[in-house]
Amino acid sequence: MSHLSRRAFLQGSALAVSAGAVSRIAAASLPEAVIQTQAGTQPPLNPASGRPYQPVVTLNGWTLPWRMNNGIKEFHLVAEPVVREIAPGMKANLWGYNGQSPGPTIEVVEGDRVRIFVTNKLPEHTSVHWHGQRLPNGMDGVTGLTQPGIKPGKTFVYEFVARRAGTFMYHPHADEMVQMAMGMMGFWITHPKDPSFMRVDRDFVFLLNAYDIEPGAATPRVNQMTDFNLWTWNSRAFPGIDPLVVRQHDRVRIRVGNLTMTNHPIHLHGHEFVVSGTDGGWTPPASRWPEVSVDIAVGQMRAIEFDASEPGDWALHCHKSHHTMNAMGHEVPTMIGVDQKSVLKKINQLIPDYMVMGDKGGSMGEMEMPLPDNTLPMMGGQGPYGSLEMGGMFSVVKVRAGLARNDYRDPGWYRAPAGSVAYEWQGAAADLPAAGSPRPAASDAADKETVVNVVKPAAHRHQ
């Protein structure tokens, strides 16, 4: 795993902005604050100390290492400005933890006593709310209500017992609108005491988040409420989101948390799943039912599970169509059916690069047009049959036979068996089936027609 030691990083660089605010004695007692500099999916972090569990895989993310101190599991989060690659070709100035946004996933075991050191390197105070945890009130991380804000350069300590297994999140409860709009959030997994309880073969986690970053800019507009132009998973937009690689017949769990400003119906192709976990914990097996989409509201967490029985490349995406686009211009008029050719020459005299667009629809996945610096095309991503015409909250679950148990490497595109791919009709048009079904004979229609007679109350003068 590509981690850097915070201490080594600080010793070897001039980044001493707020490190100097932490005394040498205090720093010596702090656990290492490991940082991550890569946006790719890191392998699961198998526990080298503490109680055993089956680790998760954070999509385009990583798990924070810890140290054991007299039976307490200690972590060190550093809140700080970071540069996150949203997708190849675009980087954003965000706020996050330990070098990335979102911050690293924290994994513990039910019953663990946990101590988290939080050092603030932001230009304003912050705090951390442990979303969904049962804990002492003073550890809940709400600035002004349960604690004072952590001022720049200061380190606070949170300590509590992870009392129930499940899927949780963490985020600031200080200047929340700005800090969350800047990308401050992370995932928290509390594993069950019994590693065999609800064990799956592959366990993925990611957070839904969104940004409004104008083309050519790099810092989000933090006052945006609903009109975002970058819909992301773990602050990555397709084609920058990694695939979820799965071995055929694996039992797969996908845990999703929503920290955007709207709900997201997450849809999986090719398989049905059950919702096995909610904010309140694990769902009893008797109350589950099969679905192919699950709606995740703001502030909610959901865990879905399925048997990866069908080999292939299966889309996984938000079903709000604008959420599978990047950097959209929402004020653009609809040009379908509008003949622009008559004015194209005149426009080209003023704007030589102007192109006719939208008169036949919005399909522009294979059009090459100049873009402003530091932005993403509205749609893109090349698949084995051409442009995928997707962006935003989209990825692919790649189910393959014969993968090793811990192999998460991208196996490439699926090679469909001969005769199993949709194909172009090569016969004569006359041989095509007639469009629509023949109308039934009048006598048959009359026999089957149901006539409803409605008698309306005369007192109300209805006709």
Image (cartoon, rainbow, N blue to C red):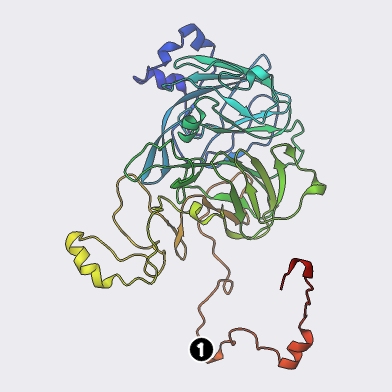
Q: Quadrant of residue 168?
A: top right
In the picture provided, is 256 more to the left or to the right than 339?
right
- Asked if residue 295 lies left or right of residue 234, the reply is right
User: In the drawing, does residue 266 fall left or right of residue 459?
Assistant: left
Residue 349, given in percent of the width and then of the height, sits at 17, 63
Q: Is residue 145 visible?
A: yes
Pick whichever, 345 or 405, lies toward us: 345
Residue 214 x/y as whole percent: 36, 44
105, 122: nearer the viewer: 122
Could you say where residue 397 lies in the image, as x and y percent from the top left? Answer: 58, 53
Image quarter of the C terminus: bottom right
Q: Amino acid at mark 1?
A: Ala
Compared with residue 287, is residue 110 higher up or lower down, i.e. above or below? above
The residue closer to the viewer here, 347 or 290, is 347
Along the horizontal axis of the image, is 329 left or right of 184? Answer: left
Q: Is residue 457 visible?
A: no
Would you call the spot at circle 1 few (<14 residues within 10 Å), some (14-19), or many (20 or more)?
few
Residue at 35 percent of width and 21 percent of height: 13
Residue at 64% x, 17% y: name it: 138
* Residue furthest right as drawn: 286
Q: Secondary structure at mark 1?
A: helix
Horizontal and vertical percent position of residue 396: 55, 54
Residue pushed farthest top?
25
Q: Residue beneath label 1, please?
A: 429
Q: Nearer the viewer, residue 230 or 73?
A: 230
- Residue at point 47%, 33% (across, down): 100
Q: Residue at x 58, y 69 (%)?
A: 417
Which quadrant of the view contains residue 50?
top right
